[in-house]
Image (cartoon, rainbow, N blue to C red):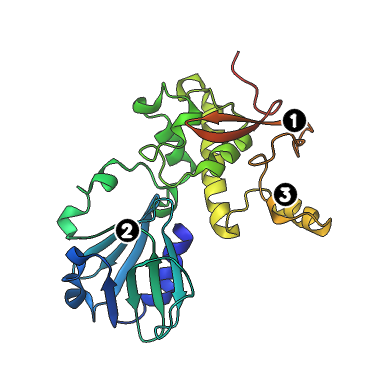
């Protein structure tokens, strides 16, 4: 979502909005109030987007599983079977949200009390948190007894960590999913914080590739497809670990598939 937010910012935040269109009837009165205004900022909180106006209003959207932003010239619409939910257009560009059902307009004083925003955890990307700040967050008492495999998917812990990042973060940190923050040494907490920080930002820069740039270059030259060189462990069950040649295994944790290396991530004894 961080990449999407930047794309929206670049597309429609540089000029007054000539079109603000909502699919939902209860939001339609906002059209006249927001047309002609400029977006002051576009920021993320996990998978939620906050489109903020200088006058204090915020359009809140959450893609859930199906929402998708598309971009085009204002006099065109993408060829898609999806249903348009929100349109923001300047004279030069349109940002269009399809299929999402969670859209609202919030007054400035109501943003922090929104149910999703109120319970969201640390967003490493939008907050600009560094590794030490992430480590301090991991060390919070509320999280001490929860297994990492469950905790990393909890948006009230870390916002924006999806399923593939969970497996990749744990691999890079060298930690088994069953470990809890209270089981970790300070060094392991710092490794976990570094993996979270590094891979979330790498994923933004590379559009979802978490493997090292050197390995990606080498594997692409060898003719590997993107799905095969993209990740360290995610989606690679039955294959050899890039680092140690041990087998990658798949388990189900929090009803989602999780991948790990049998040697690089030993279970706690």
Q: Is residue 234 left or right of residue 18?
A: right
Q: Residue at x 18, y 77 (%)?
A: 32
Left or right side of 14 for 254: right
Kindly indicate whether the residue at mark 3 contacts the one at mark 2 (C-beta within 8 angstroms): no
Q: Residues within 10 Å of mark 2 (few under 14, many from 20)?
A: many
| Mark 3 touches mark 1? (CB < 8 Å) | no
The answer to which of 89 and 210 lies nearer the viewer is 89
Residue 47 place in picture, x, y as percent:
40, 52
Alpha carbon separation for disc pair 1 and 2: 40 Å
- Real-space CA distance between mark 3 and mark 1, rounded to the nearest whole angstrom: 15 Å
Rendered-image quadrant of the C terminus: top right
Q: Which residue is mark 1?
A: 247
Q: Which residue is mark 3?
A: 228
Mark number, residue 219: none
For this orientation, the residue located farthest to the right is: 222
Question: Vertically, is 45 above or below 74?
Answer: above
- Which of the numbered marks, if any, corresponds to residue 61? 2
Q: Secondary structure at mark 1?
A: loop
Residue at the image point whose x is 17% and y is 60% from the top: 107
Instruction: Identify the residue shown where x is 36% and y is 86%.
Output: 91
Q: Residues within 10 Å of mark 3 (few under 14, many from 20)?
A: some
Q: Position of residue 185 (x, y in %)?
A: 53, 23
- Residue 64 percent location from the top left of the image: 39, 51
Vertical arrangement, residue 210 with respect to residue 175, above or below: below
Between 100 and 128, the residue placed more toward the observer is 100
The Cα–Cα distance between marks 2 and 3, rounded to whole angstroms, is 33 Å
Residue 59 % position (x, y): 27, 63
Q: Residue at x 37, y 29 (%)?
A: 140
Mark 2 or 3, nearer chain start: 2
Q: Secondary structure at mark 2?
A: strand
């Amino acid at each position: 979502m961080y990449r999407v937010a930047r794309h929206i910012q670049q597309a429609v935040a540089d000029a007054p909005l000539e079109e603000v269109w909502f699919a939902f009837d209860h939001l339609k009165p906002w059209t006249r109030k927001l047309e002609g205004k400029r977006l002051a900022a576009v920021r993320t909180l996990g998978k939620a987007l906050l489109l903020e106006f200088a006058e204090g209003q915020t359009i809140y959207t959450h893609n859930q599983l199906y929402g998708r932003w598309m971009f085009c010239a204002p006099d065109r619409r993408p060829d898609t079977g999806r249903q348009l939910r929100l349109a923001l257009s300047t004279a030069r560009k349109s940002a269009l949200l399809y299929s999402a059902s969670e859209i609202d307009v919030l007054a400035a004083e109501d943003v922090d009390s929104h149910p999703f925003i109120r319970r969201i955890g640390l967003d490493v990307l939008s907050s600009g948190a560094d590794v030490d700040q992430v480590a301090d967050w991991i060390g919070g008492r509320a999280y001490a007894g929860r297994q990492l495999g469950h905790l990393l998917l909890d948006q009230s812990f870390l916002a924006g960590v999806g399923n593939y990042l969970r497996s990749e973060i744990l691999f890079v940190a060298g930690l088994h999913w069953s470990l809890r923050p209270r089981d970790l040494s300070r060094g392991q907490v710092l490794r976990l914080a570094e993996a979270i920080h590094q891979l979330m930002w790498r994923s933004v820069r590379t559009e979802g590739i978490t493997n090292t740039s050197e390995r990606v270059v080498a594997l692409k030259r060898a003719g590997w497809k993107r799905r095969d060189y993209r990740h360290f462990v995610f989606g690679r069950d039955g294959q050899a670990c890039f680092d140690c040649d041990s087998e990658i295994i798949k388990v189900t944790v929090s009803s989602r598939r999780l991948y790990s290396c049998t040697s690089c991530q030993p279970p706690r004894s």
